[in-house]
Amino acid sequence: MTLDFFTDIAFLAGAIAFVWGLRLLSSPDTARRGNIIAGLGMGIAILAAMFQPMGTVPNNYLWIVGGMVVGGIAGWISARKVQMTAMPQMVSIFNGLGGACAVVLASAELYYFYDGQTALSMGELLILYLALLIGAVAFTGSMLAFAKLQGLVNDRKVTLPYHNILNLIMLAVLLGLTVYALMQGKAFGFNMAMLILALGLIYGFSFVAPIGGADMPVVISLLNSFSGLSAASAGFAYDSRIMIVGGILVGASGTILTILMCEAMNRSLLNVLIGGFGSSGKAGPAGAAGDQVAKEVSLTDAAIQLFYSNSVVIVPGYGLAVAQAQMVVKELDALLEANGVNVKYGIHPVAGRMPGHMNVLLAEADIPYDKLLDLDAANEALAQADIAVVVGANDVVNPAAETDPSSPIYGMPVLQVWKAKNVIVLKRSMNPGYAGIQNPLFFMDNTRMLFGDAKDTLNKLVQEIKNM
Protein backbone atom coordinates (compact mmCIF):
# COMPACT_ATOMS: atom_id res chain seq x y z
CA MET A 1 0.00 0.00 0.00
CA THR A 2 1.28 3.45 -0.93
CA LEU A 3 1.36 6.61 1.15
CA ASP A 4 -1.34 8.03 -1.13
CA PHE A 5 -3.68 5.25 0.01
CA PHE A 6 -3.25 6.10 3.68
CA THR A 7 -3.67 9.85 3.12
CA ASP A 8 -6.85 9.19 1.14
CA ILE A 9 -8.20 7.07 4.01
CA ALA A 10 -7.29 9.83 6.47
CA PHE A 11 -9.05 12.44 4.33
CA LEU A 12 -12.13 10.19 4.17
CA ALA A 13 -12.10 9.83 7.97
CA GLY A 14 -11.79 13.60 8.30
CA ALA A 15 -14.71 14.19 5.94
CA ILE A 16 -16.88 11.69 7.84
CA ALA A 17 -15.99 13.46 11.10
CA PHE A 18 -17.00 16.81 9.55
CA VAL A 19 -20.43 15.47 8.54
CA TRP A 20 -20.97 13.65 11.83
CA GLY A 21 -19.94 16.69 13.87
CA LEU A 22 -22.19 18.96 11.82
CA ARG A 23 -25.10 16.62 12.42
CA LEU A 24 -24.53 16.68 16.18
CA LEU A 25 -24.46 20.49 16.16
CA SER A 26 -28.19 20.49 15.38
CA SER A 27 -29.03 19.99 19.08
CA PRO A 28 -27.64 21.76 22.17
CA ASP A 29 -27.55 18.37 23.91
CA THR A 30 -24.97 17.03 21.46
CA ALA A 31 -23.35 20.23 20.16
CA ARG A 32 -20.30 19.98 22.42
CA ARG A 33 -19.60 16.43 21.23
CA GLY A 34 -20.15 17.55 17.64
CA ASN A 35 -17.55 20.28 18.01
CA ILE A 36 -15.02 17.82 19.41
CA ILE A 37 -15.62 15.28 16.64
CA ALA A 38 -15.38 17.91 13.90
CA GLY A 39 -12.20 19.25 15.50
CA LEU A 40 -10.69 15.76 15.51
CA GLY A 41 -11.64 15.44 11.84
CA MET A 42 -9.81 18.67 11.08
CA GLY A 43 -6.77 17.44 13.00
CA ILE A 44 -6.73 14.21 10.99
CA ALA A 45 -7.03 16.17 7.74
CA ILE A 46 -4.15 18.48 8.68
CA LEU A 47 -1.87 15.58 9.61
CA ALA A 48 -2.73 13.77 6.39
CA ALA A 49 -1.98 16.89 4.37
CA MET A 50 1.41 17.21 6.06
CA PHE A 51 2.43 13.73 4.94
CA GLN A 52 0.79 13.86 1.51
CA PRO A 53 3.35 13.31 -1.28
CA MET A 54 4.03 16.63 -3.04
CA GLY A 55 6.05 15.43 -6.03
CA THR A 56 9.04 17.70 -6.58
CA VAL A 57 7.70 20.36 -4.19
CA PRO A 58 9.09 19.91 -0.65
CA ASN A 59 6.81 20.08 2.38
CA ASN A 60 7.58 23.14 4.46
CA TYR A 61 6.81 21.85 7.93
CA LEU A 62 8.09 24.98 9.66
CA TRP A 63 5.41 27.14 8.04
CA ILE A 64 2.72 24.52 8.66
CA VAL A 65 3.54 24.03 12.34
CA GLY A 66 3.98 27.77 12.82
CA GLY A 67 0.55 28.44 11.35
CA MET A 68 -1.02 25.73 13.50
CA VAL A 69 0.55 27.14 16.67
CA VAL A 70 -0.52 30.73 15.95
CA GLY A 71 -4.01 29.68 14.87
CA GLY A 72 -4.40 27.31 17.81
CA ILE A 73 -3.41 29.96 20.34
CA ALA A 74 -5.75 32.53 18.75
CA GLY A 75 -8.62 30.04 18.73
CA TRP A 76 -8.02 28.99 22.32
CA ILE A 77 -7.91 32.57 23.58
CA SER A 78 -11.04 33.46 21.62
CA ALA A 79 -12.96 30.48 22.98
CA ARG A 80 -11.95 31.34 26.54
CA LYS A 81 -12.38 35.11 26.45
CA VAL A 82 -15.25 35.89 24.07
CA GLN A 83 -18.64 36.13 25.79
CA MET A 84 -21.75 34.49 24.34
CA THR A 85 -23.11 37.95 23.56
CA ALA A 86 -20.14 38.55 21.25
CA MET A 87 -20.25 35.14 19.58
CA PRO A 88 -21.74 36.49 16.31
CA GLN A 89 -18.87 38.98 16.06
CA MET A 90 -16.34 36.20 16.55
CA VAL A 91 -18.06 34.05 13.92
CA SER A 92 -17.96 37.01 11.55
CA ILE A 93 -14.21 37.47 12.06
CA PHE A 94 -13.54 33.77 11.52
CA ASN A 95 -15.63 33.89 8.34
CA GLY A 96 -13.56 36.80 7.12
CA LEU A 97 -10.26 35.09 7.89
CA GLY A 98 -11.41 32.03 5.96
CA GLY A 99 -12.11 34.24 2.97
CA ALA A 100 -8.72 35.93 3.38
CA CYS A 101 -6.99 32.52 3.25
CA ALA A 102 -8.69 31.78 -0.07
CA VAL A 103 -7.55 35.19 -1.37
CA VAL A 104 -3.93 34.48 -0.41
CA LEU A 105 -3.96 31.03 -2.04
CA ALA A 106 -5.61 32.28 -5.24
CA SER A 107 -3.27 35.28 -5.44
CA ALA A 108 -0.20 33.05 -5.12
CA GLU A 109 -1.42 30.72 -7.88
CA LEU A 110 -2.27 33.65 -10.16
CA TYR A 111 1.20 35.11 -9.58
CA TYR A 112 2.87 31.85 -10.67
CA PHE A 113 0.54 31.66 -13.68
CA TYR A 114 1.14 35.19 -14.94
CA ASP A 115 4.87 34.86 -14.18
CA GLY A 116 5.00 31.92 -16.54
CA GLN A 117 5.90 29.32 -13.91
CA THR A 118 2.66 27.32 -14.29
CA ALA A 119 0.10 26.61 -16.98
CA LEU A 120 -3.64 26.72 -16.33
CA SER A 121 -6.66 25.84 -18.42
CA MET A 122 -9.51 28.35 -18.68
CA GLY A 123 -11.52 26.25 -16.23
CA GLU A 124 -8.70 26.28 -13.67
CA LEU A 125 -8.24 30.02 -14.15
CA LEU A 126 -11.97 30.55 -13.59
CA ILE A 127 -11.80 28.60 -10.33
CA LEU A 128 -8.92 30.77 -9.11
CA TYR A 129 -10.80 33.98 -9.90
CA LEU A 130 -13.89 32.63 -8.14
CA ALA A 131 -11.80 31.89 -5.04
CA LEU A 132 -10.26 35.36 -5.29
CA LEU A 133 -13.54 37.24 -5.65
CA ILE A 134 -15.68 35.22 -3.23
CA GLY A 135 -12.90 35.25 -0.65
CA ALA A 136 -12.46 39.02 -1.02
CA VAL A 137 -16.17 39.67 -0.53
CA ALA A 138 -16.29 37.31 2.46
CA PHE A 139 -13.28 39.03 4.05
CA THR A 140 -14.19 42.71 3.90
CA GLY A 141 -17.92 42.01 4.21
CA SER A 142 -17.35 40.01 7.38
CA MET A 143 -15.08 42.67 8.84
CA LEU A 144 -17.76 45.33 8.34
CA ALA A 145 -20.43 43.00 9.76
CA PHE A 146 -18.23 42.57 12.83
CA ALA A 147 -17.83 46.34 13.17
CA LYS A 148 -21.58 46.88 12.91
CA LEU A 149 -22.42 44.22 15.51
CA GLN A 150 -19.74 45.59 17.81
CA GLY A 151 -21.26 49.05 17.52
CA LEU A 152 -18.11 50.51 15.94
CA VAL A 153 -19.84 51.66 12.75
CA ASN A 154 -22.99 53.69 12.21
CA ASP A 155 -24.97 52.49 9.17
CA ARG A 156 -25.59 56.04 7.98
CA LYS A 157 -21.87 56.80 7.80
CA VAL A 158 -21.02 53.98 5.39
CA THR A 159 -23.88 54.27 2.93
CA LEU A 160 -24.31 56.49 -0.11
CA PRO A 161 -27.38 57.63 -2.04
CA TYR A 162 -28.61 54.85 -4.36
CA HIS A 163 -26.11 52.52 -2.73
CA ASN A 164 -27.75 49.34 -4.01
CA ILE A 165 -27.56 50.61 -7.59
CA LEU A 166 -23.87 51.38 -7.03
CA ASN A 167 -23.39 47.81 -5.80
CA LEU A 168 -25.01 46.41 -8.93
CA ILE A 169 -22.71 48.52 -11.12
CA MET A 170 -19.64 47.37 -9.17
CA LEU A 171 -20.71 43.73 -9.46
CA ALA A 172 -21.22 44.09 -13.22
CA VAL A 173 -17.75 45.66 -13.58
CA LEU A 174 -16.17 42.85 -11.54
CA LEU A 175 -17.86 40.14 -13.58
CA GLY A 176 -16.96 41.90 -16.82
CA LEU A 177 -13.29 42.22 -15.83
CA THR A 178 -13.21 38.56 -14.79
CA VAL A 179 -14.61 37.41 -18.13
CA TYR A 180 -12.08 39.64 -19.92
CA ALA A 181 -9.26 38.14 -17.80
CA LEU A 182 -10.32 34.63 -18.82
CA MET A 183 -10.36 35.62 -22.47
CA GLN A 184 -6.95 37.32 -22.34
CA GLY A 185 -5.14 34.51 -20.51
CA LYS A 186 -1.56 35.39 -19.53
CA ALA A 187 -1.76 38.65 -21.47
CA PHE A 188 -4.05 40.04 -18.76
CA GLY A 189 -1.19 40.31 -16.26
CA PHE A 190 -0.85 39.92 -12.52
CA ASN A 191 -1.25 43.65 -11.82
CA MET A 192 -4.67 43.64 -13.48
CA ALA A 193 -5.58 40.58 -11.43
CA MET A 194 -4.72 42.52 -8.30
CA LEU A 195 -6.95 45.35 -9.56
CA ILE A 196 -9.82 42.85 -9.63
CA LEU A 197 -8.88 41.81 -6.09
CA ALA A 198 -8.90 45.44 -4.91
CA LEU A 199 -12.33 46.01 -6.48
CA GLY A 200 -13.56 42.77 -4.88
CA LEU A 201 -12.42 43.94 -1.46
CA ILE A 202 -14.19 47.28 -1.96
CA TYR A 203 -17.31 45.52 -3.21
CA GLY A 204 -17.39 43.25 -0.14
CA PHE A 205 -17.42 46.31 2.12
CA SER A 206 -19.98 48.08 -0.05
CA PHE A 207 -22.16 44.94 -0.27
CA VAL A 208 -22.68 44.88 3.51
CA ALA A 209 -22.76 48.66 4.07
CA PRO A 210 -26.47 49.32 3.35
CA ILE A 211 -27.73 46.29 5.27
CA GLY A 212 -29.24 47.19 8.63
CA GLY A 213 -27.86 46.05 11.96
CA ALA A 214 -30.90 43.87 12.71
CA ASP A 215 -30.15 41.84 9.59
CA MET A 216 -26.49 41.29 10.40
CA PRO A 217 -27.06 37.69 11.66
CA VAL A 218 -28.51 36.80 8.24
CA VAL A 219 -25.62 38.51 6.48
CA ILE A 220 -23.07 36.69 8.66
CA SER A 221 -24.69 33.39 7.75
CA LEU A 222 -24.58 34.32 4.06
CA LEU A 223 -20.93 35.38 4.30
CA ASN A 224 -20.23 32.10 6.07
CA SER A 225 -21.49 30.29 2.98
CA PHE A 226 -19.28 32.57 0.84
CA SER A 227 -16.20 31.62 2.85
CA GLY A 228 -17.10 27.96 2.36
CA LEU A 229 -17.45 28.42 -1.38
CA SER A 230 -14.11 30.22 -1.55
CA ALA A 231 -12.47 27.33 0.35
CA ALA A 232 -14.07 24.81 -2.01
CA SER A 233 -12.80 26.80 -5.01
CA ALA A 234 -9.30 26.78 -3.55
CA GLY A 235 -9.69 23.05 -3.05
CA PHE A 236 -10.44 22.58 -6.73
CA ALA A 237 -7.40 24.70 -7.60
CA TYR A 238 -5.16 22.55 -5.42
CA ASP A 239 -6.92 19.28 -6.22
CA SER A 240 -7.56 18.82 -2.50
CA ARG A 241 -10.63 16.71 -1.89
CA ILE A 242 -10.74 17.48 1.83
CA MET A 243 -10.81 21.23 1.12
CA ILE A 244 -13.58 20.68 -1.40
CA VAL A 245 -15.65 18.63 1.04
CA GLY A 246 -15.08 21.04 3.93
CA GLY A 247 -15.84 24.07 1.78
CA ILE A 248 -19.01 22.55 0.37
CA LEU A 249 -20.23 21.61 3.85
CA VAL A 250 -19.65 25.15 5.13
CA GLY A 251 -21.20 26.68 2.01
CA ALA A 252 -24.25 24.41 2.09
CA SER A 253 -24.87 24.74 5.83
CA GLY A 254 -24.46 28.53 5.65
CA THR A 255 -26.91 28.72 2.77
CA ILE A 256 -29.47 26.53 4.55
CA LEU A 257 -29.14 28.58 7.73
CA THR A 258 -29.58 31.80 5.75
CA ILE A 259 -32.77 30.48 4.18
CA LEU A 260 -34.13 29.31 7.54
CA MET A 261 -33.45 32.70 9.11
CA CYS A 262 -35.19 34.50 6.27
CA GLU A 263 -38.18 32.18 6.63
CA ALA A 264 -38.25 32.87 10.39
CA MET A 265 -38.56 36.58 9.57
CA ASN A 266 -40.97 35.93 6.69
CA ARG A 267 -38.71 37.83 4.31
CA SER A 268 -36.83 36.99 1.16
CA LEU A 269 -33.05 37.11 1.01
CA LEU A 270 -33.30 39.85 -1.61
CA ASN A 271 -35.39 41.92 0.81
CA VAL A 272 -32.74 41.46 3.49
CA LEU A 273 -29.93 42.51 1.14
CA ILE A 274 -31.61 45.63 -0.23
CA GLY A 275 -34.24 46.42 2.39
CA GLY A 276 -32.07 48.21 4.95
CA PHE A 277 -34.23 46.86 7.80
CA GLY A 278 -32.84 47.74 11.17
CA SER A 279 -30.41 50.38 9.98
CA SER A 280 -29.50 53.04 12.41
CA GLY A 281 -32.07 55.73 12.16
CA LYS A 282 -34.77 57.45 14.12
CA ALA A 283 -36.02 55.33 16.94
CA GLY A 284 -39.47 55.44 18.39
CA PRO A 285 -40.27 57.46 21.48
CA ALA A 286 -38.23 56.42 24.46
CA GLY A 287 -40.92 56.44 27.11
CA ALA A 288 -44.28 56.30 25.39
CA ALA A 289 -46.05 55.66 22.12
CA GLY A 290 -48.26 58.64 21.43
CA ASP A 291 -50.24 59.35 24.59
CA GLN A 292 -49.70 55.86 26.00
CA VAL A 293 -47.65 55.27 29.12
CA ALA A 294 -46.14 51.97 30.22
CA LYS A 295 -47.30 50.59 33.58
CA GLU A 296 -44.76 49.27 36.08
CA VAL A 297 -45.03 46.39 38.56
CA SER A 298 -43.23 46.06 41.88
CA LEU A 299 -40.95 43.12 42.68
CA THR A 300 -43.34 41.96 45.41
CA ASP A 301 -46.39 41.98 43.14
CA ALA A 302 -44.49 40.22 40.37
CA ALA A 303 -43.29 37.53 42.79
CA ILE A 304 -46.83 36.95 44.10
CA GLN A 305 -48.24 36.65 40.58
CA LEU A 306 -45.58 34.16 39.55
CA PHE A 307 -45.73 32.10 42.74
CA TYR A 308 -49.49 31.55 42.54
CA SER A 309 -49.72 30.96 38.79
CA ASN A 310 -50.50 27.64 37.18
CA SER A 311 -48.43 28.13 34.05
CA VAL A 312 -45.61 30.50 33.13
CA VAL A 313 -43.84 30.92 29.78
CA ILE A 314 -40.45 32.63 29.93
CA VAL A 315 -39.32 34.35 26.71
CA PRO A 316 -35.55 35.01 26.73
CA GLY A 317 -33.88 37.58 24.48
CA TYR A 318 -30.59 39.34 23.93
CA GLY A 319 -30.98 41.22 27.22
CA LEU A 320 -30.74 37.92 29.08
CA ALA A 321 -27.52 37.13 27.22
CA VAL A 322 -26.02 40.55 27.98
CA ALA A 323 -26.84 40.22 31.68
CA GLN A 324 -25.69 36.56 31.72
CA ALA A 325 -28.82 35.81 33.70
CA GLN A 326 -29.47 32.23 32.54
CA MET A 327 -28.40 30.69 35.87
CA VAL A 328 -30.81 32.93 37.79
CA VAL A 329 -33.60 32.03 35.37
CA LYS A 330 -32.91 28.38 36.18
CA GLU A 331 -33.18 29.16 39.92
CA LEU A 332 -36.48 30.98 39.36
CA ASP A 333 -37.69 28.03 37.29
CA ALA A 334 -36.83 25.57 40.10
CA LEU A 335 -38.66 27.66 42.74
CA LEU A 336 -41.80 27.92 40.65
CA GLU A 337 -41.76 24.24 39.68
CA ALA A 338 -41.43 23.31 43.38
CA ASN A 339 -44.67 25.22 43.99
CA GLY A 340 -46.48 23.34 41.20
CA VAL A 341 -46.12 25.98 38.48
CA ASN A 342 -45.64 24.62 34.95
CA VAL A 343 -42.70 26.55 33.47
CA LYS A 344 -41.83 26.52 29.77
CA TYR A 345 -39.62 28.66 27.53
CA GLY A 346 -40.66 30.30 24.27
CA ILE A 347 -37.73 30.40 21.84
CA HIS A 348 -37.90 32.50 18.69
CA PRO A 349 -35.70 31.24 15.79
CA VAL A 350 -33.83 34.56 15.57
CA ALA A 351 -33.88 35.59 19.22
CA GLY A 352 -30.53 37.02 20.29
CA ARG A 353 -27.94 37.63 17.61
CA MET A 354 -27.84 34.23 15.90
CA PRO A 355 -29.97 31.09 15.58
CA GLY A 356 -29.72 28.85 18.62
CA HIS A 357 -28.32 31.68 20.76
CA MET A 358 -30.99 31.29 23.45
CA ASN A 359 -30.91 27.49 23.30
CA VAL A 360 -27.18 27.47 24.04
CA LEU A 361 -27.52 29.96 26.90
CA LEU A 362 -30.27 27.95 28.57
CA ALA A 363 -28.39 24.69 27.98
CA GLU A 364 -25.47 26.24 29.91
CA ALA A 365 -27.84 26.50 32.88
CA ASP A 366 -28.86 22.81 32.50
CA ILE A 367 -32.44 23.69 31.66
CA PRO A 368 -34.02 20.54 30.14
CA TYR A 369 -34.26 20.80 26.37
CA ASP A 370 -37.86 19.54 26.35
CA LYS A 371 -38.91 22.71 28.19
CA LEU A 372 -37.78 24.84 25.25
CA LEU A 373 -40.67 25.38 22.85
CA ASP A 374 -40.27 26.44 19.23
CA LEU A 375 -42.34 29.27 17.78
CA ASP A 376 -45.59 27.39 17.04
CA ALA A 377 -45.59 25.34 20.25
CA ALA A 378 -44.69 28.43 22.29
CA ASN A 379 -47.60 30.42 20.84
CA GLU A 380 -49.98 27.59 21.77
CA ALA A 381 -48.61 27.59 25.32
CA LEU A 382 -48.75 31.40 25.56
CA ALA A 383 -52.45 31.41 24.72
CA GLN A 384 -53.05 29.23 27.81
CA ALA A 385 -50.45 30.79 30.11
CA ASP A 386 -51.22 32.76 33.24
CA ILE A 387 -48.06 34.84 32.86
CA ALA A 388 -45.54 35.45 30.10
CA VAL A 389 -42.21 36.68 31.41
CA VAL A 390 -40.20 38.51 28.75
CA VAL A 391 -36.53 38.73 29.72
CA GLY A 392 -34.72 41.19 27.46
CA ALA A 393 -36.61 40.30 24.27
CA ASN A 394 -38.09 43.04 22.14
CA ASP A 395 -38.57 42.71 18.39
CA VAL A 396 -39.50 39.01 18.52
CA VAL A 397 -42.48 39.82 20.80
CA ASN A 398 -43.65 42.92 18.94
CA PRO A 399 -47.37 42.71 18.00
CA ALA A 400 -46.79 45.30 15.25
CA ALA A 401 -45.51 42.38 13.17
CA GLU A 402 -49.12 41.22 12.97
CA THR A 403 -51.13 44.43 13.29
CA ASP A 404 -49.22 47.27 11.62
CA PRO A 405 -48.68 47.00 7.83
CA SER A 406 -46.43 50.08 7.96
CA SER A 407 -44.02 48.45 10.41
CA PRO A 408 -40.64 47.26 9.03
CA ILE A 409 -41.21 43.90 10.74
CA TYR A 410 -44.78 43.41 9.48
CA GLY A 411 -45.29 39.79 8.47
CA MET A 412 -42.45 38.48 10.64
CA PRO A 413 -43.63 35.55 12.81
CA VAL A 414 -43.39 36.58 16.47
CA LEU A 415 -44.07 35.11 19.90
CA GLN A 416 -47.62 36.17 20.82
CA VAL A 417 -46.91 36.93 24.47
CA TRP A 418 -49.79 39.41 24.62
CA LYS A 419 -52.21 36.45 24.45
CA ALA A 420 -51.18 35.35 27.95
CA LYS A 421 -53.41 36.55 30.79
CA ASN A 422 -50.60 38.75 32.11
CA VAL A 423 -47.24 39.86 30.75
CA ILE A 424 -44.21 40.93 32.79
CA VAL A 425 -41.41 42.52 30.77
CA LEU A 426 -37.93 42.71 32.28
CA LYS A 427 -36.08 45.49 30.52
CA ARG A 428 -33.39 48.07 31.28
CA SER A 429 -35.36 50.96 29.78
CA MET A 430 -38.02 51.83 27.22
CA ASN A 431 -35.46 52.13 24.44
CA PRO A 432 -36.38 50.35 21.19
CA GLY A 433 -34.86 46.98 20.34
CA TYR A 434 -32.30 46.01 17.73
CA ALA A 435 -34.63 46.88 14.86
CA GLY A 436 -34.91 50.45 16.16
CA ILE A 437 -38.73 50.48 16.42
CA GLN A 438 -41.05 50.92 19.38
CA ASN A 439 -43.01 47.96 20.77
CA PRO A 440 -46.75 48.44 21.44
CA LEU A 441 -46.66 45.43 23.77
CA PHE A 442 -45.21 47.62 26.51
CA PHE A 443 -48.35 49.75 26.60
CA MET A 444 -51.01 47.01 26.56
CA ASP A 445 -53.45 46.67 29.46
CA ASN A 446 -52.17 43.25 30.54
CA THR A 447 -48.47 44.23 30.40
CA ARG A 448 -46.38 45.42 33.31
CA MET A 449 -42.76 46.60 33.11
CA LEU A 450 -40.07 45.57 35.59
CA PHE A 451 -37.08 47.82 34.91
CA GLY A 452 -33.44 47.08 35.68
CA ASP A 453 -30.56 44.79 34.79
CA ALA A 454 -32.03 41.36 34.05
CA LYS A 455 -29.70 39.44 36.36
CA ASP A 456 -30.07 41.84 39.26
CA THR A 457 -33.86 42.01 38.85
CA LEU A 458 -34.21 38.24 38.62
CA ASN A 459 -32.03 37.78 41.71
CA LYS A 460 -34.31 40.13 43.65
CA LEU A 461 -37.37 38.35 42.27
CA VAL A 462 -35.98 34.99 43.38
CA GLN A 463 -35.32 36.38 46.86
CA GLU A 464 -38.89 37.71 47.07
CA ILE A 465 -40.26 34.27 46.20
CA LYS A 466 -37.98 32.57 48.74
CA ASN A 467 -39.31 34.91 51.43
CA MET A 468 -42.94 34.03 50.73
Image: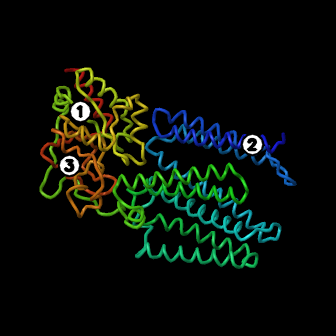
Q: Secondary structure at mark 2?
A: helix
Q: Position of residue 274 (x, y in %)?
A: 40, 67
Q: Closer to the observer: label 1 or label 2? A: 2
Left or right: where 247 falls relative to 1: left
Identify the mark at residue 48; answer none if there is no mark. Answer: 2
Q: Say which residue label 1 marks.
A: 312
Do the CB atoms of the residues marked 3 and 1 lie less than 8 Å apart?
A: no
Q: How is the image coloured?
A: rainbow
| Secondary structure state at the residue bearing disc 3 | helix
Quadrant where the image shows the N terminus: top right
N-terminal of the two: label 2 or label 3? Answer: 2
Q: Position of residue 426 (x, y in %)?
A: 26, 40
Which residue of the protein is positioned furthest toward the right in this rendering?
Answer: 56
Horizontally, residue 449 falls left or right of residue 23, namely left
- Labels 2, 3: front one: 2
Three-letter amino acid code at disc 3? Answer: Leu
Pointer 1 or 2: first along the chain: 2
Q: Position of residue 77 (x, y in %)?
A: 58, 40
Quadrant hosting residue 215: bottom left
As drawn, the label of residue 441 is: 3
Label 2, label 3: how far apart the Cα atoms are:
57 Å
Q: Find residue 403 and report its horizontal and vertical position in percent.
A: 20, 57
